[in-house]
Image (spheres, coloured by chain):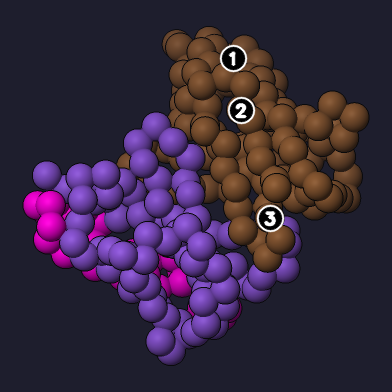
Chain colours: A purple, B brown
Amino acid sequence: EAGVAQSPRYKIIEKRQSVAFWCNPISGHATLYWYQQILGQGPKLLIQFQNNGVVDDSQLPKDRFSAERLKGVDSTLKIQPAKLEDSAVYLCASSLNRDTGNTIYFGEGSWLTVV
Amino acid sequence: AQSVTQLDSHVSVSEGTPVLLRCNYSSSYSPSLFWYVQHPNKGLQLLLKYTSAATLVKGINGFEAEFKKSETSFHLTKPSAHMSDAAEYFCVVTQYGNKLVFGAGTILRVKS
Protein backbone atom coordinates (compact mmCIF):
# COMPACT_ATOMS: atom_id res chain seq x y z
CA GLU A 1 0.00 0.00 0.00
CA ALA A 2 1.40 3.37 -1.00
CA GLY A 3 1.95 5.82 1.82
CA VAL A 4 1.33 9.55 2.05
CA ALA A 5 3.25 11.33 -0.70
CA GLN A 6 4.57 14.86 -0.34
CA SER A 7 6.51 17.21 -2.60
CA PRO A 8 8.81 18.97 -2.77
CA ARG A 9 10.93 17.43 -0.03
CA TYR A 10 13.12 20.49 0.38
CA LYS A 11 12.64 24.15 -0.44
CA ILE A 12 14.67 27.27 0.28
CA ILE A 13 13.06 30.66 -0.37
CA GLU A 14 13.65 34.25 0.60
CA LYS A 15 11.33 36.01 3.02
CA ARG A 16 8.26 37.54 1.41
CA GLN A 17 8.33 34.95 -1.40
CA SER A 18 5.65 32.32 -1.79
CA VAL A 19 5.80 28.54 -1.67
CA ALA A 20 3.37 25.67 -2.19
CA PHE A 21 3.46 22.12 -0.89
CA TRP A 22 1.53 19.21 -2.33
CA CYS A 23 0.21 16.11 -0.61
CA ASN A 24 -1.43 12.93 -1.84
CA PRO A 25 -2.94 10.87 1.00
CA ILE A 26 -3.37 7.14 1.24
CA SER A 27 -6.06 5.95 -1.15
CA GLY A 28 -9.49 5.92 0.45
CA HIS A 29 -8.57 8.13 3.38
CA ALA A 30 -11.23 10.76 3.92
CA THR A 31 -9.37 12.82 6.52
CA LEU A 32 -6.26 14.81 5.67
CA TYR A 33 -4.11 16.89 8.02
CA TRP A 34 -1.31 19.42 7.67
CA TYR A 35 1.07 19.75 10.61
CA GLN A 36 3.91 22.21 11.14
CA GLN A 37 7.01 21.00 12.98
CA ILE A 38 9.50 23.66 14.04
CA LEU A 39 12.97 22.39 14.90
CA GLY A 40 13.09 21.07 18.45
CA GLN A 41 9.32 20.97 18.89
CA GLY A 42 6.52 18.49 18.37
CA PRO A 43 4.27 18.87 15.33
CA LYS A 44 1.35 21.28 15.59
CA LEU A 45 -1.88 20.90 13.65
CA LEU A 46 -2.48 23.60 11.06
CA ILE A 47 -5.59 22.32 9.32
CA GLN A 48 -7.79 19.25 9.10
CA PHE A 49 -9.96 18.29 6.11
CA GLN A 50 -12.78 15.80 5.91
CA ASN A 51 -13.16 14.97 2.22
CA ASN A 52 -13.09 18.41 0.56
CA GLY A 53 -14.32 20.38 3.57
CA VAL A 54 -12.33 22.12 6.29
CA VAL A 55 -13.03 20.71 9.75
CA ASP A 56 -10.53 22.68 11.80
CA ASP A 57 -8.27 25.56 10.74
CA SER A 58 -8.17 27.34 14.08
CA GLN A 59 -4.36 27.31 14.24
CA LEU A 60 -3.73 28.24 10.63
CA PRO A 61 -2.26 31.77 10.25
CA LYS A 62 -4.81 32.79 7.67
CA ASP A 63 -3.13 36.07 6.80
CA ARG A 64 -0.36 34.12 5.06
CA PHE A 65 -1.29 30.44 4.96
CA SER A 66 -3.96 28.81 2.81
CA ALA A 67 -4.84 25.22 2.04
CA GLU A 68 -7.28 23.45 -0.20
CA ARG A 69 -8.46 19.96 -1.01
CA LEU A 70 -10.76 20.69 -3.90
CA LYS A 71 -11.62 17.16 -5.06
CA GLY A 72 -11.33 15.51 -1.68
CA VAL A 73 -8.12 13.68 -2.55
CA ASP A 74 -4.83 15.56 -2.82
CA SER A 75 -4.17 18.85 -1.07
CA THR A 76 -2.03 21.94 -1.42
CA LEU A 77 -0.67 24.15 1.37
CA LYS A 78 0.49 27.63 0.37
CA ILE A 79 2.44 30.27 2.24
CA GLN A 80 2.45 33.82 0.93
CA PRO A 81 4.35 35.90 1.92
CA ALA A 82 6.77 33.73 3.87
CA LYS A 83 8.41 34.89 7.10
CA LEU A 84 11.61 33.67 8.71
CA GLU A 85 9.61 31.96 11.45
CA ASP A 86 7.87 29.77 8.85
CA SER A 87 11.06 27.73 8.55
CA ALA A 88 9.87 24.27 9.55
CA VAL A 89 8.92 20.84 8.31
CA TYR A 90 5.40 20.64 6.91
CA LEU A 91 3.94 17.22 7.48
CA CYS A 92 0.93 15.90 5.64
CA ALA A 93 -1.01 13.02 7.18
CA SER A 94 -4.17 11.06 6.52
CA SER A 95 -6.57 8.71 8.26
CA LEU A 96 -9.53 6.64 7.19
CA ASN A 97 -11.94 8.97 8.97
CA ARG A 98 -12.23 11.29 11.99
CA ASP A 99 -13.15 8.62 14.55
CA THR A 100 -10.98 9.19 17.61
CA GLY A 101 -8.20 6.64 17.78
CA ASN A 102 -8.05 6.06 14.04
CA THR A 103 -4.42 5.58 13.03
CA ILE A 104 -2.94 8.64 11.36
CA TYR A 105 -0.23 8.01 8.75
CA PHE A 106 2.38 10.66 8.00
CA GLY A 107 4.34 11.55 4.91
CA GLU A 108 8.08 12.23 5.05
CA GLY A 109 7.54 15.96 5.18
CA SER A 110 8.46 19.05 3.19
CA TRP A 111 11.38 20.95 4.68
CA LEU A 112 11.15 24.72 4.29
CA THR A 113 13.96 27.15 4.96
CA VAL A 114 13.16 30.85 4.72
CA VAL A 115 16.23 33.10 4.46
CA ALA B 1 -8.08 20.24 26.78
CA GLN B 2 -5.86 17.27 26.12
CA SER B 3 -2.08 17.52 26.55
CA VAL B 4 1.00 15.37 27.08
CA THR B 5 4.24 16.02 28.91
CA GLN B 6 7.37 14.13 28.03
CA LEU B 7 9.48 14.21 31.12
CA ASP B 8 12.89 13.88 29.47
CA SER B 9 14.12 15.82 26.46
CA HIS B 10 17.13 13.49 26.04
CA VAL B 11 17.75 9.91 27.13
CA SER B 12 21.03 8.07 26.65
CA VAL B 13 21.39 4.29 27.05
CA SER B 14 23.96 1.68 26.15
CA GLU B 15 23.19 -0.89 23.51
CA GLY B 16 21.57 -3.96 25.07
CA THR B 17 20.23 -2.11 28.13
CA PRO B 18 16.56 -1.25 28.82
CA VAL B 19 14.88 1.86 27.46
CA LEU B 20 12.36 3.95 29.41
CA LEU B 21 10.80 7.07 27.87
CA ARG B 22 8.34 8.79 30.18
CA CYS B 23 5.06 10.45 29.27
CA ASN B 24 2.25 11.91 31.37
CA TYR B 25 -1.05 12.93 29.86
CA SER B 26 -3.95 15.18 30.72
CA SER B 27 -7.37 14.47 29.28
CA SER B 28 -10.92 15.38 30.15
CA TYR B 29 -12.18 12.04 28.85
CA SER B 30 -10.85 8.55 28.25
CA PRO B 31 -7.96 9.22 25.93
CA SER B 32 -6.45 7.54 22.91
CA LEU B 33 -2.67 7.61 23.24
CA PHE B 34 0.09 6.94 20.75
CA TRP B 35 3.84 6.77 20.51
CA TYR B 36 5.43 7.85 17.25
CA VAL B 37 9.10 7.63 16.27
CA GLN B 38 10.95 9.97 13.92
CA HIS B 39 14.32 9.06 12.49
CA PRO B 40 16.49 11.86 11.08
CA ASN B 41 15.07 13.31 7.88
CA LYS B 42 12.21 10.84 7.95
CA GLY B 43 8.51 11.08 8.57
CA LEU B 44 6.70 9.97 11.71
CA GLN B 45 6.12 6.26 12.15
CA LEU B 46 3.53 4.82 14.51
CA LEU B 47 5.08 2.61 17.20
CA LEU B 48 1.95 1.69 19.11
CA LYS B 49 -1.44 2.97 20.22
CA TYR B 50 -3.80 2.64 23.17
CA THR B 51 -7.54 2.97 22.57
CA SER B 52 -9.14 1.70 25.83
CA ALA B 53 -8.57 -2.00 25.27
CA ALA B 54 -5.69 -3.78 27.04
CA THR B 55 -3.64 -1.46 29.22
CA LEU B 56 -0.37 -3.04 28.14
CA VAL B 57 0.16 -2.27 24.49
CA LYS B 58 2.75 -3.98 22.34
CA GLY B 59 4.15 -2.20 19.33
CA ILE B 60 6.69 -2.67 16.61
CA ASN B 61 10.41 -3.34 17.09
CA GLY B 62 9.97 -4.73 20.60
CA PHE B 63 8.52 -1.58 22.15
CA GLU B 64 5.61 -1.59 24.56
CA ALA B 65 3.76 0.91 26.72
CA GLU B 66 1.50 0.62 29.74
CA PHE B 67 -1.51 2.87 30.26
CA LYS B 68 -1.86 3.73 33.97
CA LYS B 69 -4.94 5.80 34.62
CA SER B 70 -4.18 6.32 38.31
CA GLU B 71 -0.82 7.87 37.42
CA THR B 72 -1.98 9.47 34.13
CA SER B 73 1.08 7.93 32.52
CA PHE B 74 1.88 6.13 29.28
CA HIS B 75 5.58 5.30 29.47
CA LEU B 76 7.37 3.60 26.57
CA THR B 77 9.76 0.73 27.29
CA LYS B 78 11.98 -1.74 25.49
CA PRO B 79 13.95 -4.49 27.22
CA SER B 80 17.10 -4.15 25.14
CA ALA B 81 18.15 -1.13 23.09
CA HIS B 82 19.53 -1.46 19.59
CA MET B 83 21.60 1.09 17.73
CA SER B 84 18.79 1.48 15.21
CA ASP B 85 16.48 2.71 17.99
CA ALA B 86 18.32 6.04 18.09
CA ALA B 87 15.69 8.59 17.06
CA GLU B 88 13.21 11.10 18.45
CA TYR B 89 10.09 9.73 20.12
CA PHE B 90 6.80 11.55 20.52
CA CYS B 91 4.02 10.80 22.95
CA VAL B 92 0.67 11.84 21.50
CA VAL B 93 -2.92 12.20 22.73
CA THR B 94 -5.95 12.64 20.54
CA GLN B 95 -8.47 15.43 20.74
CA TYR B 96 -12.06 15.05 19.66
CA GLY B 97 -12.22 14.54 15.91
CA ASN B 98 -8.99 12.54 15.82
CA LYS B 99 -6.66 15.52 16.04
CA LEU B 100 -3.27 14.71 17.51
CA VAL B 101 -1.61 16.72 20.27
CA PHE B 102 2.11 16.02 20.44
CA GLY B 103 4.54 16.18 23.31
CA ALA B 104 7.82 18.03 22.85
CA GLY B 105 9.68 14.84 22.04
CA THR B 106 12.45 12.76 23.62
CA ILE B 107 15.69 12.19 21.76
CA LEU B 108 17.03 8.70 22.40
CA ARG B 109 20.73 8.15 22.05
CA VAL B 110 22.13 4.60 22.00
CA LYS B 111 25.78 4.14 22.82
CA SER B 112 27.78 1.20 21.54
Question: Is residue B95 one of those drawn in magenta?
Answer: no
Between the residue at mark 2 and the residue at mark 1, the CA separation in whole angstroms equals 23 Å
On the rendered structure, is B21 left or right of A41?
Answer: right
Per the image, the residue denoted by label 2 is B6
Residues packed near mark 1 inside 10 Å, few (<14), some (14 to 19) or many (20 plus): some
Residues packed near mark 2 inside 10 Å, few (<14), some (14 to 19) or many (20 plus): many
Question: Is residue A5 one of those drawn in magenta?
Answer: yes
Helix, strand or loop at label 2? It is: strand
Q: Mark 3 lies on which chain?
A: B
Viewer-nearest residue: B12 or A93: A93
Say if labels 1 and 3 share a chain.
yes
Residue segment shown in magenta:
A1-30
Q: Residue B95 carries which label?
A: 3
Q: Which chain carries label 2?
A: B
Helix, strand or loop at label 1? It is: loop
Q: What residue type is labelled 2?
A: Gln
Viewer-nearest residue: A77 or B44: A77
Q: In which quarter of the image is residue A110?
A: bottom left
Q: Which chain carries label 1?
A: B
Q: Which mark is residue A30?
A: none
Where A12 falls versus A104 (above or below)? above
Q: Residue at x 81, y 47 (%)?
A: B28
Q: Residue at x 28, y 63 (%)?
A: A64
